[in-house]
Amino acid sequence: GIEREIRESELTVDIIEQNETEATIRIELRDAETGDPIALEDPFDEHPRVSPIGHEQRDGYIMIGDERVETNASGVATLTVRSPGSYTVEYHPGSWRTHDPAYVGDRASVGWHPLSTVSGWLTLIVDVFRYSIPFLVALYAGLKLGSFLHIPEERYL
């Protein structure tokens, strides 16, 4: 018989820092209606069953890949990833029966690739040049050897 308010959540994901080996992802979770942060972190985590009076604890969590993340009191979480690719971040809210207001889950995506940075492109160019040097030397030597052993066509007539 108790009515609960159900609200939309707003999940945003941004890359705040990246280089050719890793990227730092910033995840922010807010109430879509009021803009207030949705905190998932339990500041009293050492005693999970004990909670001060008046402290509202949320059971929800955020998944990114296989990793579970919780936002802090500001509704923000950061995570460093080392594998390039596309990442889907999904908010799994706690039960609507035990939270007031209750939230609806949300999903957002972000992609990271080393070639999305200038240093990534420079690294690629340097690596391609460095690994092609033995082939260029072999090609040059083959052309020089071929011109040295060149037999005129008149000899076959």
Image (cartoon, grey):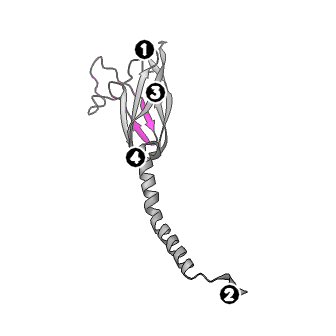
Q: Nearer the viewer, residue 24 or 77?
A: 24
Label 2 neighbourhood size at 10 Å, few (<14), some (14-19), many (20+)? few
| Horizontal arrangement in the rendering, residue 137 relative to residue 149 (left or right) | left
Q: Residue furthest front?
A: 154
Reading the image, the residue beneath label 1 is 34
Q: Quadrant of the C terminus?
A: bottom right
Q: Residue type at mark 1?
A: Thr
Earlier sequence position, callout 4 versus callout 3: 3
Earlier sequence position, callout 3 versus callout 2: 3
Label 1 neighbourhood size at 10 Å, few (<14), some (14-19), many (20+)? few
Say the numbered circle drawn on residue 11. 3
Earlier sequence position, callout 2 versus callout 4: 4
Reading the image, the residue beneath label 2 is 155
Say the numbered circle drawn on residue 15. none
Q: Where residue 43 sits: x, y (%)?
A: 28, 28
Cα separation between marks 1 and 2: 92 Å
Earlier sequence position, callout 1 versus callout 2: 1
Say the numbered circle drawn on residue 119. 4
Q: In front of the other: label 1 or label 4?
A: 4
Q: Residue type at mark 2?
A: Arg
